[in-house]
Image (cartoon, rainbow, N blue to C red):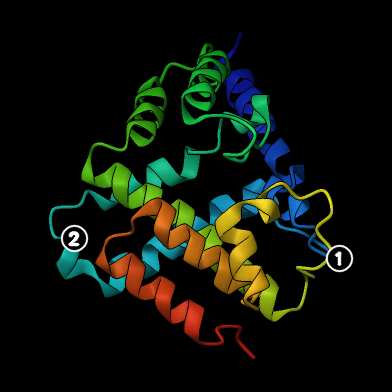
Amino acid sequence: MERAEKVLKFYTLCNTLKDVVRTGWKNWNVKRERIESVAEHVYGVQMLAFGIYSEYKEEYKDLDFEKVIMMLAIHELEETVIGDFTFYQITKEEKNAKGHAAVAKILKDLANYYIKEIIEEFDARQTNEAKFAYFCDKLECDVQCKLYDEQKCVDVNFQTNNIRAREPKVAKLIDEGASWSYMWMTFGQERYNYDKPFLEISNFAKDNKILNK
């Protein structure tokens, strides 16, 4: 296979993520003309990382930010093969196993196996870069939820087939009258254990309108 063909084969596969709608938004019955694709999430999470690193650089003096951006650019690569799973559909261990097998298949014709190493580092969440990238990945989803909520795209009372809406902590918040995004972000803060800058941003989004006029 020629090098040019390898490049285009890889690009064409990645291009399919433009048409893969994020599963979480489908599960919550988001009503909107266009719902975020995986490719749009990949773009959004990188822009969020740029903003966070810009304003909180003092807290992350030893961070290799270029590696973070690399991680975020390719962290959904496996979804070109296995699709977009939520944590209710599959365990972390199962997703990593399926994802690493998919990445090996995707990259088998490319000379640069650094991509595979970066994805494995991201999934392990042991380095500062992997932890920062992971927090960005989760916070971006929270912020997107907030934007959809401000656009009134979700009715929390219309969630018949939504497993997550029946999760005890989520159901309790909904019963208490919490907005969709307040519930989502509260749940996220408890689950992901954000460090201080990420928690600060999450709390600001919970308590304020953020949609640009």
Is 57 in front, or is 179? 179
Q: Residue at image x 18%, y 60%?
A: 60
Residue picked out by circle 2: 60
Residue 105 found in image quarter: top right
The local secondary structure at tag 1 comes to loop
- The answer to whether 44 appears left or right of 71 in the picture is right
The local secondary structure at tag 2 comes to helix
Q: Residue at image x 27%, y 45%?
A: 129
Residue 180 found in image quarter: bottom right
Any mark on residue 121, and which?
A: none
Q: Position of residue 70 (x, y in %)?
A: 39, 42
Q: Residue at image x 55%, y 50%?
A: 42
Q: Residue at image x 34%, y 55%?
A: 193
- The answer to whether 67 appears left or right of 89 in the picture is left
Q: Position of residue 178 (x, y in %)?
A: 61, 76
The Cα–Cα distance between marks 1 and 2, rounded to whole angstroms, is 38 Å
Residue picked out by circle 1: 33
Numbered disc total: 2
Q: Quadrant of the C terminus?
A: bottom right
Q: Position of residue 24 (x, y in %)?
A: 68, 50
Amino acid type at mark 2: Tyr
For this orientation, the residue located farthest to the top is 1
